[in-house]
Image: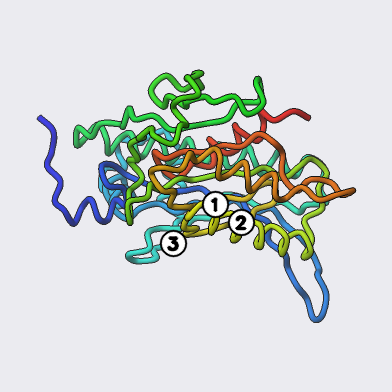
């Protein structure tokens, strides 16, 4: 018989129906005096308070799982903001720095998944079988659906993206608009400078205004940009984000973003999903 959860437990779990945590892979620029001294790739994990506390209380269940035990021993308590633990860092100039950082992020992601699964099994929580939407490099701008249950992209009819089609959004609906998460990969070899930042920001803002889309957040990382936006029900999300990508193409200059992109209306994509997407892009 599954144990019962209180509303306060779900709040501490951060997810509406299950535990949510995240792994961050970011670029850390260290400045000494009036110049940049060193640049590092840093991997950091944020664990929801409920999962951490419950696993800590039952740490005997993880005997032999050194990754989980070390996380429990070294994480910093941030109160309602959860627990934070450093999972590795490497200087950008080092050989294979990017690969090392990704491996650390992947290892940490799997550690959190084991912790989440323990909580899910203990309380009989069900993983959502809802569908999100993803683009796949095998057919440029071909419409596919990411089936989280089968763990693969599946082709769908173009009508799915039509202006009269309704797509449920487990990630939330606000002001009669659905929340979508878009991952835009920087074009290979692209140098993301201030000029490009301004161009992207203006393009995103003007395109969103034209489509009546509300941009909630736009985060820039070393290899990609993550945009969270509320898209009107009558607007095809693919049309909106492709207009942004096209608007970031500049005459006689390298495009800012690759043509392929990742989009989900199920939940904010995990680091594992984003890394898998970036690895799938053509070299």
Q: Can you tell which quarter of the image residue 86 is in?
A: bottom right
Badge 2 marks a residue whose secondary structure is helix
Q: Which residue is mark 1?
A: 227
Residue sticking out furthest to the right: 252
> Mark number for residue 204?
2
> Mark number for residue 76?
3
In the rendered image, residue 102, in percent from the top left (x then y), is placed at 64, 40
Tally of numbered discs: 3
Q: Vertical placement of 28 versus 147: above or below?
A: below
2 vs 3, front mark: 2
Q: Can you tell which quarter of the image residue 185 is in?
A: top right
Lateral position of residue 34 relative to residue 107, left or right: right
In the rendered image, residue 87, in percent from the top left (x then y), is placed at 56, 49
Nearer to us in this view, 140 or 262: 140
Spatial CA span between label 1 and label 2: 9 Å
Q: Upstream in the sequence, badge 1 or badge 2?
A: 2
Badge 3 marks a residue whose secondary structure is strand
């Amino acid at each position: 018989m599954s144990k019962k959860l209180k509303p306060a437990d779900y709040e501490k779990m951060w997810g509406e129906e299950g535990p949510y945590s995240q792994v961050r892979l970011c670029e850390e620029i260290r400045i000494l005096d009036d110049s940049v001294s060193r640049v590092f790739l840093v991997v950091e994990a944020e664990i929801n308070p409920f999962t951490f506390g419950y696993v800590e209380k039952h740490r005997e269940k993880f005997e032999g799982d050194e990754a989980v035990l070390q996380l429990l021993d070294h994480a910093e308590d941030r109160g309602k903001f959860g627990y934070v633990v450093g999972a590795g860092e490497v200087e950008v100039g080092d050989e294979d720095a990017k690969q090392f950082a990704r491996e650390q992020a992947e290892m940490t992601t799997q550690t959190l998944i084991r912790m989440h699964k323990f909580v899910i099994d203990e309380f009989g929580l069900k993983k959502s079988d809802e569908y999100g939407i993803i683009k796949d490099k095998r057919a440029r701008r071909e419409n596919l659906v990411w089936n989280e249950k089968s763990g693969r992209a599946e082709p769908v009819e173009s009508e799915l993206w039509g202006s009269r089609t309704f797509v449920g959004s487990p990630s939330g609906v606000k002001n009669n608009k659905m929340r979508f998460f878009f991952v835009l990969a920087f074009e290979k070899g692209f140098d993301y400078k201030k000029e490009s930042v301004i161009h992207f920001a203006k393009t995103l803002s003007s395109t969103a205004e034209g489509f009546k889309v509300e941009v909630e957040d736009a985060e820039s990382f070393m290899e990609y940009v993550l945009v969270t936006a509320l898209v009107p029900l009558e607007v095809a999300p693919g049309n909106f984000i492709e207009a942004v990508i096209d608007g970031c193409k500049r005459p006689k200059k390298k495009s800012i973003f690759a043509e392929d992109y990742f989009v989900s209306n199920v939940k904010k994509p995990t680091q594992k999903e984003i890394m898998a997407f970036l690895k799938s892009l053509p070299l």
